[in-house]
Amino acid sequence: MFALLTRTTCAAAIAAAALSTPVLAQDWKADLPAFRVGLLGGENEADRLRKNDCMVEQLGELLGVPVELYPASDYAGVMQGLVSGQLDAAQLGASAYAGIYLQDPEAVEPIFVALEADGSDGYYAMMYAKSDSGIENIEQMEGKSLAFADPNSTSGYLVPKAELEAAEIDIEEYFSSTGFGGGHEQAVVAVLNGQYDAGVTWTSGVGEAADGFSRGALRSMVDKNLLDMSDLSIIWQSNLIPNGPWVVRKALADEPKQIAIDWMEALHETDRQCYIDVSQGEGQGFKRVDHSFFEGVVAMRQRELEGSR
């Protein structure tokens, strides 16, 4: 009798487990009614949303929950959304990731960086001026005004500031004034309109300069007919900067996290145009990374924070 009851009980337990498994596998959807993706500022909101339409459609279908896009007017909005748990994923610059990590190391984890057209995993900060300004190099910027892109931008603030200071250029003394353009695209427009003498932005540094290179803010503006590169001169270039990461919220359940990772990892092969739009230009796909890839930028951002106190 005991053996019979045991077998019956075990059979019931197995049946119950079999019935409950699909329910348990979907439990994460109760806590994730939508997969929320933050979009950094830098170009106008309509363009940012349009370029990520394919993500909304494709990733939403794979997840079985809607993908919602949240464009922010500046980097800080996306950063705070990730720290507070109001966003589940975003593409960040390396400095923005470093800022989040220094605030809360458990908030997000980096999963990918986009590879450039030549397979490299870094990019450059470039300083530009109007081609008819007579400014051809950083030495001729003394006494002139400079537009940074955003205080949380790697190429648009952190790295140019750090490298210029390493070259013994006192930012406050050297330039007549500095300011923030409100994003990469906006800073370029400000320079073209004569509000600043020069600005800094990000670019792959790969490909034809006349096209705005293969990827970056300049290329994006050229592609939208907002910029003719003959109107600008590149007057300074940084050392290679680690490409910014796609990050996901660390507390996100494993299943949706893995679905997102698998989708992104294959995207350059499954839908090339979607890859170009989501990664902001031509490239050889996404490369898996972890925190160690950004340790140098984290240290740079830490020194910046300590210097501002």
Image (cartoon, helix red, strand yellow):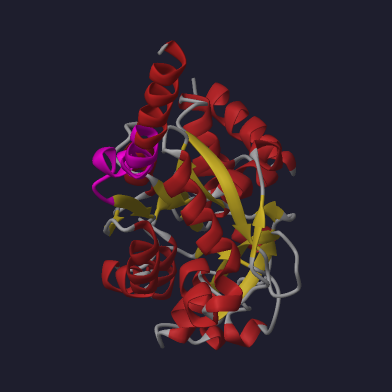
Q: Is residue 185 above or below residue 303?
A: below
Residue at 30% across / 69% down in the picture? 49
Relative placement, left or right, of 11 versus 174 is left
* Relative depth, front residue between 182 and 269: 269
Q: Is residue 122 above or below residue 116?
A: above
Residue at 60% across / 59% down in the picture? 141
- Looking at the figure, which quarter contains the N terminus? top left
Rendering coords of residue 130 (x, y %): 52, 76
Rendering coords of residue 74 (x, y %): 34, 50
Relative placement, left or right, of 20 versus 276 is left
**Magenta residue check for 170:** no
Number of marks drawn: 0
**Magenta residue check for 26:** yes
Q: Main secondary structure of the magenta part?
A: helix
* Relative depth, front residue between 270 and 150: 270
* Relative depth, front residue between 156 and 86: 86
Q: Report which quarter residue 42 is drawn in.
A: bottom left
Q: Report which quarter residue 162 is drawn in.
A: top right
Q: Which residues make up the magenta segment?
A: 16-34
Rendering coords of residue 178 (x, y %): 45, 49
